[in-house]
Image: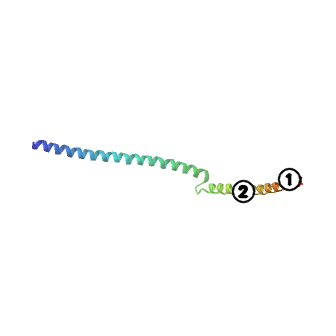
Amino acid sequence: MDVLTQAASISQIITLVGGILFGLWKIWRKIDQHQANSSARSEVIESRLDRIEAQFGPNGGGLREAVNRISANIEKMDRKVDHINRDLAHLQGEFKQHLREKDK
């Protein structure tokens, strides 16, 4: 019986060590896979940044200029919309005045 209990203890130890090693292996694989995914994502981001740099220069000066140009165009459109709104309000007032004079 003593041999059987020793064999059982040894098998339990082997099972425990095997389970620990298997768990560590799975964790290592997940970490390795996560690092590979992160590396792939960083390569995609880097290629996008390289493309932007190629289009707009290393400091993004061209991009800054484009944003400023678009901002100026938006401000110009806002001024035109304000002018159109004032003209429309004026025309509505004239139209209402014309209707009042017509009803008299």
Q: How many marks?
A: 2
Question: Could you say which is closer to the camera, residue 6 or residue 90?
Answer: 90
The residue at 48%/48% (across/down) is 41
* In-image side of 104 versus 42 (left or right): right
* Front: mark 2 or 1: 1
Query: Which residue lies under the disc numbered 2?
Result: 78
State which quadrant residue 90 falls in. Answer: bottom right
Identify which amino acid the numbered label 2 is placed on: Asp
- Tell me the CA gap for discs 2 and 1: 31 Å
SS at badge 2: helix
Colour theme = rainbow
Q: Residues within 10 Å of mark 1 (few under 14, many from 20)?
A: few
Kindly indicate whether the residue at mark 1 contacts the one at mark 2 (C-beta within 8 angstroms): no
In this view, the residue farthest toward the front is 104
The residue at 20%/45% (across/down) is 12
The image's mark for residue 1 is none
Q: Position of residue 87 (x, y in %)?
A: 80, 56
Q: Position of residue 73 (x, y in %)?
A: 71, 55
* In-image side of 57 versus 72 (left or right): left
SS at badge 1: helix
Q: Position of residue 61 (x, y in %)?
A: 62, 57
Q: Position of residue 53 (x, y in %)?
A: 58, 52
Question: Could you say which is closer to the camera, residue 91 or residue 35?
Answer: 91
The image's mark for residue 99 is 1
Q: Earlier in the sequence, mark 2 or mark 1?
A: 2
Quarter that holds the N terminus: top left
Quarter that holds the C terminus: bottom right
Identify which amino acid the numbered label 1 is placed on: Leu
The residue at 21%/44% (across/down) is 14
In this view, the residue farthest toward the left is 1
Q: Residues within 10 Å of mark 2 (few under 14, many from 20)?
A: few
* In-image side of 37 versus 10 (left or right): right
